[in-house]
């Protein structure tokens, strides 16, 4: 893609483009999770000390999910739904995805814990929205597909 300085948005603006950019991050989750696991394994002493001090675990699954969403959810800041779709299921699902993604990636929640299930919940919402868009623009039976 040609990169020029005409962009006003750093992470995308619109509906479909923001969904696509958000969805692109999912392909990196497995390697991200593995790298985070290796960092955790390399810092077992620090983690043990934190447990003794009753502090949240360093390199925990929740922290990995939050950090992952910190990057992926940037694409949800300027996600927009056409006015005439806002009260439809599409609009409600987009609002749910945006709220979930930004809460996990950019919220301040010291007592809340997240898991890989939250990632899959967000991406299921993303796919559901894509199917709803296809139906809305005229595809009779859109499908996500097996692969």
Image: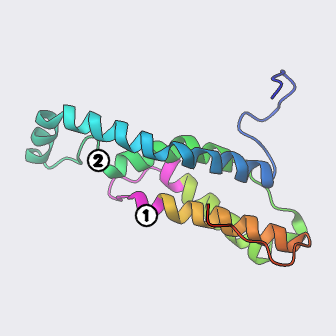
Q: Residue at position x 72%, y 67% from top?
A: 129
Q: Do the residues labelled 1 and 2 touch (CB within 8 Å)?
A: no
Give the labeled residue for mark 2: 60
The span picked out in magenta is 103-118
Q: Position of residue 93 (x, y in %)?
A: 68, 70
Q: Is residue 141 above or below residue 31?
A: below
**Mark on residue 117?**
1
Residue situated furthest front in the rendering? 147
Q: Residue at position x 35%, y 52% from top?
A: 62
Position of residue 16 in the picture relative to residue 36 (left or right):
right
Tag 1's secondary structure? Answer: helix
Label 1, label 2: how many angstroms apart (C-alpha)?
14 Å
Name the residue nearer the viewer: 126 or 102. 126
Position of residue 106 in the picture relative to residue 61 (left or right):
right
Name the residue nearer the viewer: 103 or 117. 117
Q: In this view, does 131 lie above or below 104?
A: below
Q: In this view, does 74 lie above or below 43?
A: below
**Mark on residue 75?**
none
Position of residue 73 in the picture relative to residue 15 (left or right):
left
Mark 1 or 2, which is nearer the eye? Answer: 1
Name the residue nearer the viewer: 5 or 145. 145
Quarter of the picture containing the C terminus is bottom right
Q: Residue at position x 14%, y 37% from top?
A: 44
Position of residue 94 in the picture relative to residue 41 (left or right):
right
Q: Position of residue 104 (x, y in %)?
A: 48, 53
Q: Position of residue 107 (x, y in %)?
A: 49, 50
Name the residue nearer the viewer: 24 or 142. 142
């Amino acid at each position: 893609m040609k990169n020029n300085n005409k962009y006003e948005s750093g992470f995308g603006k619109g509906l479909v483009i923001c969904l696509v950019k958000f969805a692109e991050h999912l392909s990196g989750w497995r390697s991200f999770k593995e790298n985070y696991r290796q960092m955790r394994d390399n810092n077992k002493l620090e983690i043990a000390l934190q447990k003794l001090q009753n502090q949240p675990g360093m390199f925990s699954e929740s922290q990995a999910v939050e950090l992952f969403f910190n990057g992926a959810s940037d694409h949800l800041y300027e996600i927009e739904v056409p006015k005439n779709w806002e009260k439809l299921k599409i609009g409600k699902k987009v609002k749910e995805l945006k709220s979930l993604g930004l809460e996990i990636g950019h919220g301040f929640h010291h007592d809340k814990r997240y898991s890989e299930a939250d990632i899959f919940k967000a991406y299921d919402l993303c796919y559901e929205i894509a199917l709803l868009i296809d139906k809305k623009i005229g595809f009779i039976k859109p499908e996500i597909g097996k692969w």
